[in-house]
Amino acid sequence: MFKVNDYVMYGTTGVCQIDEIKKETFIGDEELAYYVLHTLYGNPSTIMTPVHNQKVAMRSIITKEEALALIEEIHSKEPVWLNDDRKRNENFTVALKTGNSETWIQILKSLYHKKKEMAATGKKLSVSDANILKSTERLLYEEFSTALNIPIKEVEAYILNHIG
């Protein structure tokens, strides 16, 4: 169970902070415990989610040490690419929803690699691939920003400097 002020990754919403844990009665007479969260990045939002929610992945953000280890592992990750656009989009979308930072790094490397390859021939990523890339960057950069205690605008440069 999380505590008030904990930072969590909430689904594909991104990094949130727990403001309170309270009990509410919404349906019938059953009282349920809820987390009240607010987003740290992007549009300000308040989210109420049941403590025992099974529908949306929610986990603690990674530690600074885990973030640094993930950055170091980027070199060893091999890009994964499915030529079938629909299947690739489905796989990447499912992978994003897992909430797994290591999986997100794999997606990021795969899409960066493909983007670079296509740019060499004057082409661009498909709209769906570009959207997945944008979502992956947002989620990773939010988490790394929080874990490393650096501004989100500096995360990409920080990663590039460390993988140099």
Image (tube, rainbow, N blue to C red):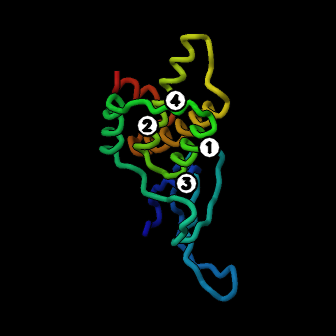
* Residue occupying the point 61% across, 24% down: 125
Q: Which residue is mark 3?
A: 11
Secondary structure of the residue carrying numbered label 4: helix
Q: Mark 2 or mark 4: which comes first in sequence? A: 2
Q: Which residue is mark 4?
A: 111
In the displayed structure, 73 sits above or below 120; it is below
In the displayed structure, 102 sits above or below 117; it is below
* Residue 40 in picture, x, y percent from top left: 55, 49
* Residue 76 in picture, x, y percent from top left: 32, 31
* Residue 29 in picture, x, y percent from top left: 66, 89
Instruction: State how far apart marks 2 and 4 are (Cα).
Output: 9 Å
Q: Which residue is mark 2?
A: 106
Identified by mark 4, the residue type is: Leu
Instruction: State how far apart marks 1 and 4 are (Cα).
Output: 23 Å
Along the viewing direction, whichever of 118 and 108 lies nearer the viewer: 118
The answer to whether the residues at label 3 and label 1 have Cβ atoms under 8 Å apart is no
The answer to whether the residues at label 2 and label 1 have Cβ atoms under 8 Å apart is no
Secondary structure of the residue carrying numbered label 1: loop
Secondary structure of the residue carrying numbered label 2: helix
* Residue occupying the point 59% across, 50% down: 13
Instruction: State how far apart marks 3 and 2 are (Cα).
Output: 18 Å
Q: Mark 3 or mark 4: which comes first in sequence? A: 3
Instruction: State how far apart marks 3 and 4 are (Cα).
Output: 21 Å
